Amino acid sequence: MWICKDNEWIPYLLVPSFGLTESSSGHSCKQIKEKLSSSCTAPVRSGVYWVQGMKVHCDMEEIDGGGWTLVWQHSYMEDFPLSTKMTYYSDYYKPCTTKASGWCNIPNKARFGATEQVICTYHRGTLVYCYASLFNRLIDDNWRGSILSGVDLRKIVDKCTSSNGVQPGPENAYAVGFTFDKKSPEAHRGENCDTYRGSLSNPVDCRWENCRLPSSISGHNRHVQMTVAIYVR
């Protein structure tokens, strides 16, 4: 972790600062970034901060100006067995402290006072595509909660060589609560897939089928490591 001293960010050495201790928890990553930015002109670093009494990963630099709270993540074909507690609308809590790999979930995502959400994908830590829209309050209730609103929908980054410019959308036919489609995202019927096909008990690998990673990304063939993350701000 980092702290601002003499207008430079230096490694955090147990010096109390907003968002860096449980007692100084912020309400959201956005609030922490705004407060730290007001006291230091150096960029606020991404990493683990204390938010509402829990440690969370905050993207402060890479995504659309930063201030994003990681609320759900799943690394496809790596986290088994699948269960409903892993869905993005689950009420099961598993700390979201890293974007590297694995899965996590923070229930009651509306608690952060968010007005926006993003769906981002990573290949071994490299951001591949990321789309943002208004916050969807169904994210705490059912599979429709990851549908990106047409209002204020925007592409932040998209390195796909196929379906470039097409936002991801959830499917309700395959592994509901996990599966995304980037080819026909408004169908929601399992016509295409970008993550899983099949059921929770029998998932079928279709990672990057609708995207096709560019050759500039190491291991760019289909069916390679993929992590999907949802952030709110």
Image (cartoon, helix red, strand yellow):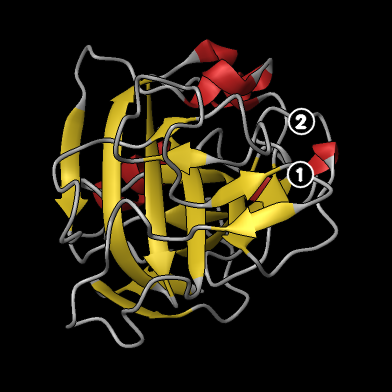
Say if residue 29 shows up in the picture.
Answer: no
* Residue 2 versus residue 218 in the image, above or below: above
User: How crowded is the residue under tag 1: few (<14 C-alpha within 10 Å), some, or many (20+)?
Assistant: many
Give the image location of residue 51, x and y in percent.
61, 43
The residue indicated by pointer 1 is: 86
The residue indicated by pointer 2 is: 90
Give the image location of residue 70, x and y in percent.
53, 47
- Tag 2: residue type? Ser
Do the numbered discs 2 and 1 sit on residues whose CB atoms are within 8 Å?
Answer: yes
Q: Quadrant of residue 116?
A: top left
Say if residue 187 shows up in the picture.
Answer: yes
Circle 1 sits in a helix, a strand or a loop, which is it? helix
> In whole angstroms, how far apart are the C-alphas of marks 2 and 1?
7 Å
User: How crowded is the residue under tag 2: few (<14 C-alpha within 10 Å), some, or many (20+)?
Assistant: many
Q: Nearer the viewer, residue 217 or 120?
A: 217
Give the image location of residue 88, x and y in percent.
65, 35
Give the image location of residue 141, x and y in percent.
69, 15
Q: Residue at x 41, y 19 (%)?
A: 135
Q: Residue at x 68, y 27 (%)?
A: 89
| Label ID, residue 153 | none
With 127 as the anchor, is 196 left or right in this view?
right
Q: Quadrant of the C terminus?
A: top left
